[in-house]
Amino acid sequence: MEGQHMAISEVQPGPNLPVAPALDEGEDAQWHRFAKATMLGAALRLWAFVVVIVVAIGQQRLTDGDFEGLWDFLVQLGIVWLWRILGILAGLGVLATIGAAISWRFKKFAITQEGIQFKSGVFVKKHLHLRWDRIQSVDVTQQFLARLLKMGTVKVESAGGGDSLELGLLNRDQCEGLRQAILTAENQARSGEPVRIANWETASLGAPTPASEQPIYRLTPKRLLVSMIISPSLLSGIVSLAGAIALIVFESGAAAIPLIVVLLGSIWSVIKAFAEKWDTSVFLAGNGVRARAGLFSTTATTTPPGRVHAVEIYQPAWWRRFDWWVLQVTVASSATELEDSSESSTILPVATREEVLRMLWVFIPDLGVDDASGFLDETLEGSGASAQFVAAPRESRFLDPFGHKRNAMAITRTAAVMRWGGLWRRSMRVVLHDHYQSLELNAGPIERRLGLANLSLRMVATSVDTEQTHLRLADARALLWEESRVGAERRKVAEKESIESWHARVGA
């Protein structure tokens, strides 16, 4: 039943057909329903859809400069028809709420010895069974309305992302209790212990609170504000504003509409990034690295250290004066989520060098070199070839004029380390030997003429770029064979840090 959605129907087996085993309902399973506020979501989504359509129509009219046409349309519509339209929408909202209430009645979940079971559907029944050994991450999210109601959703990601579950709405204490109960049961199942289902609905569960978690990082409002002020989005907004003012003064107002749209887009981009990163706090918890962030909608995520496949530390060019960096990771999680948004994997959005290096050691205990401090300094600041790094040749300057001096790759005992430079940012990427899926050597027509090639470490899903570009062909081939050999040896050893060893190392 693993990883499958099943429509359950009543089918009578024939005389020669074996009876399929019924899906284990769990005799001792206790089924739970979500909060009644969940059913309001359908009506709110309907109204949000209507608002989006109205705004899109109005924006199109304004972009075309048809101010009078828009006004005439509103006048001709009249008050009577306006009230009729609002009445129709209200009726649709009521019907959507009734449908959501019926759907809520048939939606429930249970925590059993074998995993999480979830039922839904009125006409087409669905029964999902998510085994403990398939769970990859458990997060708590709070959208804006849920946060006002002091509620949230527990999001459970499975391997491959096909069977992700969203359990909610539940009140905030229940979300924390359910998250901890799932993580505890998952750890017990993976270690071969009997799974004990905790009573997550009561306060006696002992779920970790901020007081029991060790803080390791907090993004201050001042640092976040400065990072937003010097961002390219705000710069493009200022340029658009200046251009719009100039066009309004010297030309017609309609000519400034496109620049005003760009300005509004830049402002929205800055506001969205500000709200998502607001009060980002990272803690060392019992089951991994716990992060919380958000101004309007709060998201709490837990990253188990043993499931981190790759780490990237990068610095945008406009942050060099402050020596600020970003740290993001690739975790065994939903492939769809990682492809849709790399922000979901960002652990430290704006951090000092000391903070990102400390977090690097939290995720990766050993870089596989004797002088780790000197190796990191060379990775972050160095350029050209060295005893550790194989650098891109001089010929690569035609394809990468701004970053060819820094581009280099090193293979250590435990990881492949890539160093990359460019006009807009520089970065280092660490890919663990025992986590990539395959190796690829590729070269385009210009690269072949210059004797260059690119080496990629392919992964199932990644938000970290794991391709080293524009290496000399002979060097790329040598690195490929070396990585293949070291990777095979590393997989045979299968050294993995246990959660207990991680606790002792980082002091969690």
Image: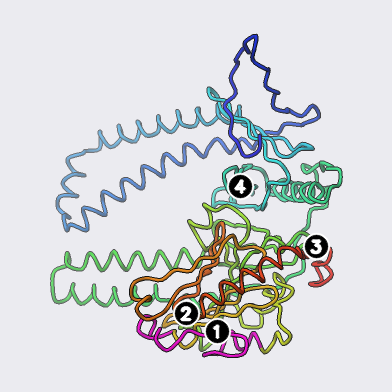
Crowding at dot 1, Cα within 10 Å, few <14 / some 14-19 / many 20+, comes out as many
Residue in the foreground of this view, choosing between 169 and 385: 385
Going by the numbered disc 4, the residue's amino acid type is Leu
Depth order, front residue of 99/197: 197
- For marks 2 and 3, the one nearer the N-term is 2
Amino acid type of the residue tagged 3 in the rendering: Ser
Provide the residue designation for mark 2: 471
Q: What element carries label 4?
A: loop
Q: Residue at x 51, y 40 (%)?
A: 41
Residue positioned 61% across, 35% down in the render: 36
Separation of marks 1 and 4 at Cα, in angstroms: 55 Å
- The crowding category of the residue bearing disc 4, from other C-alpha atoms within 10 Å (few below 14, some 14 to 19, many at least 20), is some
The amino acid at mark 1 is: Val
Callout 3 secondary element: loop
Mark closer to the chain start, 2 or 1:
1
- Residue 272 against residue 185 in the figure, above or below: below
